[in-house]
Image: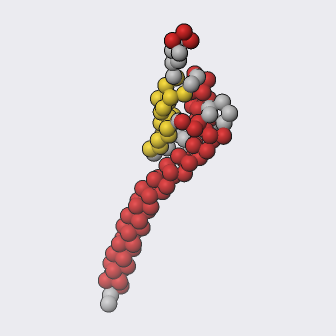
Amino acid sequence: MKFRDKWVATMRTITILMVFAFLTAACQSAYADKRTDDALYDLVKQRLASDRDAKGGGIQVDVLDGVVTLSGKVPEAKEKTAAERVTRKTKGVKAVVNKLEVETLPPRNQR
């Protein structure tokens, strides 16, 4: 086998290995993003539940690509604000979409 033939075979092998490595990395990245969203969901739920101002037991949390969406109803505006603050401070959160609604209670004479 001539030098040129060996060189071509080596370059072909290197190219195939690089393509394989790239495809493997791309697949792992997609899997890692999902795993990261799951971990972020757990962390946000834990932090909301442990915060005395947010009282996050009834808050729905959804995470997609590091963007956290909060939804549901809270009794007071300060809980809505606290939930957003706690979520924003959580490491790994890229953005927060706060769809929390403050429950409005009927007037005392109608209860």
Quarter of the image for residue 54 reads top right
Coordinates of residue 1 in the picture (x, y in percent): 32, 90
Residue 87 lies left or right of residue 101; in this view the side is: right
Q: Nearer the viewer, residue 35 or 94?
A: 35
- Give the residue drawn at x 57%, y 38%: 57
Q: Is residue 22 above or below residue 63?
A: below
- Give the residue drawn at x 61%, y 44%: 46
- Give the residue drawn at x 32%, y 87%: 2
Q: How many marks?
A: 0
Coordinates of residue 67 in the picture (x, y in percent): 48, 40
Q: Nearer the viewer, residue 71 or 20?
A: 71
Farthest bottom residue in view: 1
Residue 91 seen in this snapshot = no
Q: Is residue 74 above or below residue 24?
A: above
Quarter of the image for residue 21 reads bottom left
Q: Nearer the viewer, residue 19 or 110?
A: 110
Residue 79 lies left or right of residue 63; in this view the side is: right
- Give the residue drawn at x 44%, y 58%: 31
Coordinates of residue 75 in the picture (x, y in percent): 56, 25
Q: Is residue 27 above or below residue 54?
A: below
Residue 34 seen in this snapshot = yes
Farthest top residue in view: 109
Q: Nearer the viewer, residue 65 or 7?
A: 65
Coordinates of residue 14 in the picture (x, y in percent): 39, 73
Quarter of the image for residue 52 reads top right
Q: How is the image coloured?
A: secondary structure
